[in-house]
């Protein structure tokens, strides 16, 4: 049975979603703000999260960013029609889909099932329950998030905490381009004003430690005008 975490500060919406999902055989967990969502996601096995954008204490955008630090399950944002910018930002940060309020129950169920099929087909559910999801590998780089260790071609590499967190962010989504602002906000957990040089310096140090030829990197690539990505090896 799949477990869906529903998070919205409107209790009527949470109740309605609970009814829709329960009638389809899903188990549910309920949260009413972003902080409670984070707590439940960390302490319970969850297969998908339905997450409202506009909430007190911690909104859906920042909750998504926090979730993506340790959680790879599908996230579907619940948005109002006027929140187009938030939809784009949420998808860029790591949300998988969005549903616009007021929503149709049939659409909700269809989107939930679609994301779960995709997650399962990519090995997400089995990886989350069986093998060790904390170990990430790309080419010769292996990152063990449980042990907080990194090796390159079997040799240990010493990284600073910020370098490690940048590498973790990139390795969790190989091929995805992160802007310097996104990297700064997700790793430093601060607004990204004037962050370009800071991120570039840490990327350079990472390349010096991970790459055979830092001037011609194999793994951490720049996408000019957009940001950085971990090249799939």
Image: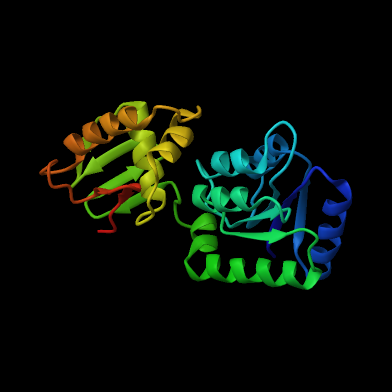
Q: How many marks?
A: 0
Say if residue 146 shows up in the picture: no
- Compared across the picture, whether 217 is left or right of 114 comes to left
**Residue 171 percent across, percent down from the top left:** 36, 48
- Compared across the picture, whether 156 is left or right of 25 comes to left
Q: Quadrant of the C terminus?
A: bottom left
> Which residue is depicted at the point 41% across and 43% down?
169
> Which residue is depicted at the point 48% across and 58% down?
127
- Compared across the picture, whether 228 is left or right of 145 comes to left
Vertical order, 225 against 35 (above or below): below
**Residue 177 percent across, percent down from the top left:** 37, 51
> Which residue is depicted at the point 17% across and 35% down?
208
- Compared across the picture, whether 180 is left or right of 219 comes to right
Query: Which is more toward the observer, 228 or 63?
Result: 228
> Which residue is depicted at the point 29% across and 47% down?
142
Q: Quadrant of the N terminus?
A: bottom right
């Amino acid at each position: 049975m799949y477990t869906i975490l529903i998070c919205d500060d409107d209790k009527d919406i949470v109740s309605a979603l609970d009814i829709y999902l329960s009638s389809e055989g899903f188990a549910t967990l309920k949260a009413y703000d972003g902080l409670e969502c984070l707590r439940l996601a960390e302490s319970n096995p969850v297969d998908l999260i339905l997450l409202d954008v506009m909430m007190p204490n911690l909104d859906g955008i920042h909750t998504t960013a926090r979730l993506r630090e340790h959680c790879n399950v599908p996230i579907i944002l619940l948005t109002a029609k006027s929140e187009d910018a938030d939809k784009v930002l949420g998808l860029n940060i790591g949300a998988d889909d969005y549903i616009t309020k007021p929503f149709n129950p049939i659409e909700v169920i269809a989107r939930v099932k679609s994301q779960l099929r995709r997650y399962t087909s990519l090995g997400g559910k089995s990886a989350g329950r069986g093998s060790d999801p904390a170990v990430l590998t790309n080419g010769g780089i292996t990152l063990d998030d449980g042990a907080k260790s990194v090796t390159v071609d079997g040799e240990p590499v010493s990284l600073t905490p910020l370098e490690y967190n940048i590498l973790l962010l990139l390795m969790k989504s190989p091929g995805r381009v992160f802007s310097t602002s996104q990297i700064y906000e997700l790793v430093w957990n601060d607004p990204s004003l004037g962050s370009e040089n800071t991120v570039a310096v840490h990327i350079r140090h990472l390349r010096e430690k991970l790459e055979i030829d830092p001037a011609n990197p194999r793994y951490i690539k720049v996408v000019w005008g957009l940001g950085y990505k971990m090249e799939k090896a």
